[in-house]
């Protein structure tokens, strides 16, 4: 396909190619179907040694793949390329939908042409991007025994997984898929998406504890969304991503005036996900609906708003935001909650949880899993070495680049003085002169660090230090988030920098869009169970609902359900009951409570604060082990400037619950009206 003309791209471009996009999305949704099996759980367990072969599911003996599905998988992707458009690109030559299942982990192991590898690089990048964001680089020491494999919610509530049940579910899924015509991708996606959500929600994409808080459906939906975004970017701009860092993303927020209505989201999803397939829904905040889309679609916002007005009237408003490079930063807009007279409302503080960046309390691994005997202070020391080495090596690269660029500019300057440069060469000269200036600024920043080579007496000592540090990087740092020495030097100079880097790049599970989607689902589960106890809500969204019920009953029933779903999140995901009237803006705020007493019980942790509030938290994992994955608290650092324990942050530290003690000031999110449940 010719590179699209930016002036001519429109929603009609996506509409023209929607069968291709949706067919590839269906295949992406099915790419990890082999993980819905006892084999996958066994292959990833701590007590079995079995090669993971989930990607070869189409060749498993006696696998009940229905004929319509097998026919679809053997179909060339190029068959869905519109006949009236430009010729299909070379990279689609030879690509089958079966490759989505068989090649999403390793195109290099396949004997294919250069063209097909370009396509499979893109597929693999989507899978790697989703996995890296969701898993947060867990340690293999967190593997679970086959018959003691637990799945967790994003809020830390665990349940035992039955591996044999997964095989039964997979057989049922194949049988259900007999009724789906995958050769008709528009109708197939409508049927396939809810079907897979029902079955894949039983399975796991990652079995290691602390990375087991997202289901197989979350991962499959994430990969399919990234593939959809990347393909839309190609069709609009002519660039197919080849690496996970090239998959750029943006957030589209559709605000629908008034209280949320049941059909609003369905209409928006049909428009944005299907009619003009540019992304997928992942989050709802009252009457704001969030979609992950291709940045190439942002210039089409005006067209999309007109289409939105056709289905939802003039009450729709659309905003678009680029997702920052450094982690996720979800824009959360101010809302006005209205509680009618004669009703009471329940509000869960999910938006405030995200806004306050409380993801830093969700650790992905224990330090002893990184290195035996590793302490927080040891981690800080080792992290400093990593950053110092990264800065030094980057400085060497910049020096060499500056030297080469300077020589080239000298030659161009001679031509400029003699008047021999063409307009194109004159433009090249200006661009490279600006680049040289920026490189020198970056080098100036990096030179604030140590000249490491001068610290070692011999080449052997230097190489030993370098190898030990690189080994630590391989063991600890996620390949998705390597430390950026220039960014660190510019932004985080000072004593708190190494600890912040450790949190950002080693221990943190960030708010990936699939994790935000999972949080929304947990909140919807809460509202649904509450509705079964107190009656149908008048107004409903995933985190806010109004009921015609007395306040005392609403408080009582809400507490019971909260303990089952969010028990480990007290103080971080608060809940409040709102009386009749209007409530504007942020209802919740961060406060510091002084700990009076912390006591361990049988499977529980009881915390008592000086203000009289008492909490009882589930203190164990599903198998009865002490929970050191989810029970972390943010404290004011009493030893700021030289701590004896904990991980040093500017004025605050994160420590596990089992190390809490009397006098600690714990930061919690509470309703401003002090109505904490």
Image (cartoon, rainbow, N blue to C red):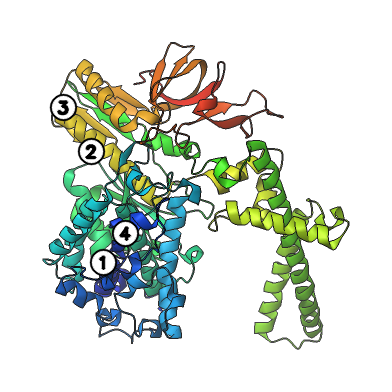
Residue contact at pointers 2 and 1, CB within 8 angstroms: no
Q: Earlier in the sequence, mark 3 or mark 4?
A: 4
Dot 2, crowdedness within 10 Å: few (<14), some or many (≥20)? some
Front-most of 144 and 591? 144
Dot 1, crowdedness within 10 Å: few (<14), some or many (≥20)? many
Residue found 34% across the figure and 68% down from its top: 55
655 left or right, relative to 55: right
- Picture disc at residue 39: 4
Q: From this viewpoint, which residue is outermost toward the right?
A: 457
The residue labelled by disc 3 is: 533
Front-most of 133 and 253? 133
Residue contact at pointers 4 and 2, CB within 8 angstroms: no
Residue found 20% across the figure and 55% down from its top: 169
Q: Quadrant of residue 670?
A: top left
The residue labelled by disc 2 is: 259
Q: Secondary structure at mark 1?
A: helix
Give how far apart the Cα atoms at labels 2 and 1 are.
33 Å
Residue 150 visible from this viewpoint: no
Q: Secondary structure at mark 3?
A: helix
Of discs 2 and 1, which sits in the foreground?
A: 1
Residue found 38% across the figure and 37% down from its top: 156
Where residue 239 appears, as percent x and y from the top left, is 45, 74
The residue labelled by disc 1 is: 26
Q: Quadrant of residue 671?
A: top left
């Amino acid at each position: 396909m010719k590179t699209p003309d930016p002036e001519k791209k429109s929603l009609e471009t996506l509409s023209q190619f929607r069968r291709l996009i949706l067919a590839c999305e269906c295949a992406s949704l099915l790419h990890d179907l082999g993980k819905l099996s006892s084999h996958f759980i066994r292959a990833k367990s701590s007590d079995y040694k079995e090669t993971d072969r989930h990607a070869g599911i189409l060749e498993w003996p006696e696998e009940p793949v229905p004929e319509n599905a097998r026919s679809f998988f053997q179909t060339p992707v190029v068959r869905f390329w519109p006949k009236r458009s430009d010729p299909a690109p070379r990279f689609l030559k030879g690509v089958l939908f079966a490759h989505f299942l068989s090649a999403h982990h390793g195109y290099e192991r396949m004997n294919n042409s250069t063209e097909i590898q370009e396509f499979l690089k893109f597929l693999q990048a989507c899978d790697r991007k989703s996995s890296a964001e969701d898993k947060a680089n867990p340690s293999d020491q967190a593997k679970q025994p086959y018959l003691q494999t637990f799945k967790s919610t994003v809020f830390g509530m665990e349940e035992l997984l039955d591996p044999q049940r997964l095989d039964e579910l997979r057989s049922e899924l194949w049988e259900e898929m007999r009724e789906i015509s995958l050769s008709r991708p528009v109708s197939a996606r409508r049927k396939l998406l809810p079907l897979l959500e029902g079955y894949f929600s039983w399975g796991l994409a990652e079995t290691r504890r602390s990375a087991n808080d997202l289901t197989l459906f979350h991962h499959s939906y994430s990969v399919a969304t990234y593939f959809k975004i990347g393909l839309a970017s190609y069709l609009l701009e002519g660039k197919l991503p080849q690496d996970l860092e090239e998959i750029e993303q943006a957030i589209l927020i559709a605000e629908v005036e008034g209280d949320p209505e049941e059909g609003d989201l369905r209409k928006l999803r049909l428009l944005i996900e299907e009619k003009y397939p540019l992304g997928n829904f992942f989050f709802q905040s009252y009457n704001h609906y969030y979609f992950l889309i291709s940045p190439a679609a942002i210039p089409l916002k005006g067209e999309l708003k007109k289409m939105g007005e056709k289905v939802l009237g003039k009450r729709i408003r659309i905003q678009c935001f680029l997702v920052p490079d450094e982690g996720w930063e979800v824009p959360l807009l101010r809302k006005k909650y209205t509680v009618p007279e004669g009703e009471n409302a329940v509000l869960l503080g999910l938006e405030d949880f995200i806004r306050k960046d409380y993801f830093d309390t969700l650790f992905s691994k224990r330090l002893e899993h990184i290195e035996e005997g590793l302490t927080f202070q040891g981690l800080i020391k080792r992290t400093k070495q990593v950053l110092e080495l990264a800065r030094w090596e980057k400085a060497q690269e910049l020096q060499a680049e500056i030297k080469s660029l300077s020589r080239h500019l000298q030659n161009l300057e001679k031509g400029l003085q003699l008047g021999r440069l063409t307009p194109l060469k004159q433009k090249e000269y200006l661009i490279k002169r600006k680049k040289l200036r920026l490189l020198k600024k970056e080098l100036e920043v990096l030179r604030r660090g140590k000249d490491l080579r001068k610290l070692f007496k011999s080449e052997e000592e230097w190489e030993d230090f370098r190898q030990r540090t690189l080994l630590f990087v391989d063991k600890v740092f996620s390949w998705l988030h390597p430390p950026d020495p220039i960014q660190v030097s510019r932004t985080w100079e000072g004593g708190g920098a190494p600890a912040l880097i450790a949190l950002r790049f080693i221990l943190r599970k960030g708010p990936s869009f699939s994790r935000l989607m999972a949080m929304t689902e947990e909140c919807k589960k809460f509202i649904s169970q509450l509705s079964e106890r107190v009656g149908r809500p008048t107004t409903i969204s995933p985190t806010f609902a109004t009921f015609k019920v007395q306040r005392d009953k609403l408080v009582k029933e809400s507490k019971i359900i909260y303990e089952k779903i969010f028990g480990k999140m007290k103080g971080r995901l608060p809940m409040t009951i709102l009386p009749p009237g209007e409530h504007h803006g942020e209802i919740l705020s961060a406060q510091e409570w002084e700990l009076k007493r912390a006591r361990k019980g049988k499977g529980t942790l009881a915390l008592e604060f000086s203000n009289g509030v008492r909490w009882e938290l589930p203190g164990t994992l599903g198998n009865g082990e002490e929970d050191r994955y989810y029970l972390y608290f943010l404290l004011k650092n009493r030893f700021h400037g030289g701590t004896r324990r904990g991980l040093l942050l500017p004025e605050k530290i994160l420590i596990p619950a089992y190390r809490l003690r009397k006098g600690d000031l714990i930061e919690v999110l509470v309703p401003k009206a002090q109505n904490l449940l």
